[in-house]
Image (tube, rainbow, N blue to C red):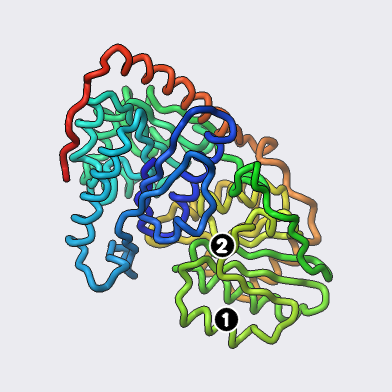
């Protein structure tokens, strides 16, 4: 599995979820996750799964990639990533390479390897989330980067972790008719209370202190979650007796912002601030209401609990979160606040309405298919059978990977 992870934790966490499900339900499969996430080793790995990390990048205020290591230039960082990626794939020699989200890899780093992988019998699959960005933006970017052509000519499988009836990815992004015919809409990837930990290693029960309604706020990886977290804490500090709040900031929140939150809200006994937790799902399960940003994983975790959910989506550098949150709000799954309208009063009002109202419908009642993981596992099992047969028929069909 490959995830570029230029920003936040979402791509890596999706790979980790799928790896965990593979190891729970299938046998005799080794998984290698090659990732650009600098926090990958924070997470517990399932059996027969290991990680190779690439030099990490993030995005500046203009949405452009920059190295996390300020002692290196972007060209140096990208060159080091290509060497590490080539070495990892050459040594692992995968039957299947599953690419998350970016068809060509970060700045095209997969392109020098893909044809050679195919020549040695490796199948190539791309896994796309339900929505990437506005249609015009993606069509322009994919035309410029050659992503549409790569998907059409090099990928053996095209998985979409969503429903065509919710977001018709092929139509939105102007993919060719032949490519649209090969799109496999697997359904959304439901997250459960133990989805981040292997079933043989379930963490101890989570019992938070209880006094009044408990609200949990998740602000993504943390790099751009400060406004959401601050507004959340400020909206609850005037309700010390009937509302308890837990903010999970994400590990990428800056040290200055962490200090500001501690100084401003540290004396409030009904408020709790956590930078990172390996028990996120347990926090959500024990909440009466969830406030979250609108990333794919965060939304799946929130709506899977069938608790009231308030979404404050990111709108820059992509509209992906806003588009998803808007559609889900129209279906009655969540409440949505545009970040431009976010303030303590608006959030407090939505919290009160959500707590006083009925529980939301299930995703299935709103027309969402949530069986993406089961469908994914079926595809993996079928691909394994096919590739094993192919390699037995052509045992010497190997060549040296290029690009190193």
Comparing labels 1 and 2, the label whose residue is closer to the camera: 1
In-front residue for pair 253/180: 253
Helix, strand or loop for disc 2: loop
Judging by the rendered image, the residue that carries numbered circle 2 is 312
Q: Which residue is mark 1?
A: 261
Q: Is residue 139 above or below residue 96?
A: below
Residue 22 lies left or right of residue 122; in this view the side is: right
Q: Residues within 10 Å of mark 1 (few under 14, many from 20)?
A: some
Q: Tell me the residue at 67%/76% (across/down).
A: 235
Of 300 and 255, which appears nearest the observer? Answer: 255
Residue at 75% from the left image edge and 55% from the top image edge: 205
Residue 271 visible in the picture = yes
Q: Residues within 10 Å of mark 2 (few under 14, many from 20)?
A: many
Q: Secondary structure at mark 1?
A: helix
**How far apart are the two marked residues, 1 and 2, measured between alpha carbons?**
19 Å
Q: Decide: is 120 above or below 30.
A: above
Query: Residue 124: image x %, image y %?
Result: 33, 30
In the rendered image, which quarter is residue 174 located in?
top left
Nearer to me, 182 or 67: 67
């Amino acid at each position: 599995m490959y995830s570029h992870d230029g920003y936040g934790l979402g791509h890596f966490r999706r790979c980790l979820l799928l790896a965990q499900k593979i190891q729970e339900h299938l046998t005799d499969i080794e998984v290698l996750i090659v990732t650009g996430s600098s926090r990958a080793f924070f997470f517990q790995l399932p059996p027969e799964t290991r990680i190779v990390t690439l030099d990490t990048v993030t995005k500046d205020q203009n949405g452009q990639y920059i190295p996390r290591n300020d002692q290196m230039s972007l060209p140096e960082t990208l060159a080091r990533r290509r060497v590490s990626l080539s070495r990892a794939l050459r040594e692992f020699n995968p039957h299947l390479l599953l690419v998350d989200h970016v068809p060509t890899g970060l700045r095209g780093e997969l392109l020098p390897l893909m044809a050679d992988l195919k020549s040695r019998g490796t199948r190539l699959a791309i896994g796309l989330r339900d929505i990437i960005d506005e249609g015009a933006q993606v069509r322009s970017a994919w035309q410029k980067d050659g992503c549409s052509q790569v998907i059409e000519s090099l990928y053996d499988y095209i998985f979409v972790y969503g429903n065509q009836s919710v977001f018709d990815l092929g139509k939105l992004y102007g993919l060719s008719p032949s490519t649209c015919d090969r799109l496999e809409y697997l359904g959304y990837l439901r997250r459960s209370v133990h989805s981040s930990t292997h079933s043989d290693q379930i963490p101890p029960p989570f019992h938070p202190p209880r006094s009044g309604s408990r609200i949990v706020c998740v602000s993504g990886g943390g790099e751009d979650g400060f406004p959401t977290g601050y507004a959340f804490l400020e909206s609850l500090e005037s309700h010390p007796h009937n509302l308890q709040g837990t903010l999970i900031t994400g590990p990428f929140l800056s040290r200055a912002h962490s200090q500001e939150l501690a100084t401003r809200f540290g004396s409030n006994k009904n408020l709790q601030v956590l930078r990172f937790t390996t028990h996120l799902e347990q926090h959500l399960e024990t909440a009466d209401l969830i406030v979250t940003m609108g990333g794919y994983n965060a939304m799946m975790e929130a709506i899977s609990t069938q608790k009231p959910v308030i979404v404050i989506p990111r709108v820059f550098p992509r509209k992906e979160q806003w588009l998803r949150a808007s559609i889900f709000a129209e279906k009655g799954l969540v409440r949505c606040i545009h970040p431009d309208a976010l303030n303590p009063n608006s959030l407090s009002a939505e919290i009160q309405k959500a707590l006083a109202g009925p529980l939301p419908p299930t995703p299935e009642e709103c027309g969402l298919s949530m069986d993406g993981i089961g469908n994914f596992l079926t595809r993996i099992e079928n691909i394994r059978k096919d590739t094993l047969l192919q390699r037995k028929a052509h045992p010497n069909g190997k060549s040296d990977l290029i690009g190193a």
